[in-house]
Image (tube, helix red, strand yellow):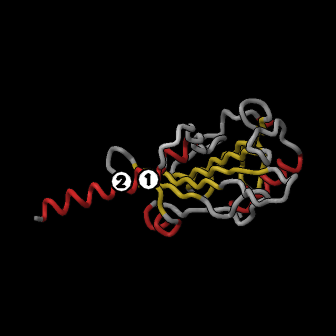
Amino acid sequence: MNRVATIVSVLLIVSAVSVSCGTSDEPAPPPTTPTGPFVYDLLLSYLNRVTLEEARSIVPFEVTLPSFLPEGVSDAPVIEVSRDSRDGSADDFTAMYWEDKSAPLGVPRLRIRIDEDNSHMSLSNVPPNKLMSVAGEQVSFEASPEGPHSNVWAAWNHEGVAFQVIFAWLSADGKDLGYVSEEMRADALKVIESMIQ
């Protein structure tokens, strides 16, 4: 009797799903897939996603997030901790800030990816024109309007932690802006300074 009841229940569920899905010959709309910088990274990081509190309890160094965020970026980052494949220990912290889609029109949307680990990054091969002092630290800083996205890349060491940060600006419709303005460069430097101080 239980087996019959189970079969009837399954048939009812299948029928309900068929009715709700419909049998229209019209093609289904294409799925909305996020595009732009860091999306591939975000998909890869799904299994490593944690809360900020969890990340701070896992990684063997002090996690630093910016206290300043420019207009056009959301203040709720996606947090990821990746582990060393050899011994399972946590060895890398990543925070991805996505664009604020509610920002006023005309404000460039900004995505920021921050990577931190307890290594030391050598800046000895960085050309002098791409090095600057920010809040007392030597920072490799490069603005690149060329390529697939308008971005700024920065790297530095601070109190035993190596930092790499990518800033990527998009238009309101998610397309590359094609330039990095002085104001955008200044905002990137303010973010970096807020992480070092």
Mark 2–mark 1 Cα distance, whole angstroms, equals 6 Å
Q: Tell me the number on the disc at residue 46.
A: none
User: In terms of depth relative to the viewer, which is nearer, 73 or 134?
Assistant: 73
Indicate the quadrant containing the C terminus: top left, top right, bottom left or bottom right.
bottom right
The x, y position of residue 190, in whole percent, is 79, 58
Q: Which residue is mark 2?
A: 15
Q: Is residue 118 left or right of residue 109?
A: left
> Considering only vertical position in the picture, is 104 above or below 180?
below
Q: Residue at x 68, y 64 (%)?
A: 75
Q: Secondary structure at mark 1?
A: helix
The x, y position of residue 22, in whole percent, is 48, 48
Q: Amino acid at mark 2?
A: Ser
> Considering only vertical position in the picture, is 107 above or below 58?
above
Q: Residue at x 72, y 44 (%)?
A: 168
Q: Secondary structure at mark 2?
A: helix
The x, y position of residue 19, in whole percent, is 43, 53
The x, y position of residue 50, in whole percent, is 47, 61
Image marks 2 and 1: residues in contact by CB distance under 8 Å: yes
Q: Which residue is mark 1?
A: 19
Q: Residue at x 61, y 62 (%)?
A: 64
Q: Quadrant of residue 38?
A: top right
Indicate the quadrant containing the N terminus: top left, top right, bottom left or bottom right.
bottom left
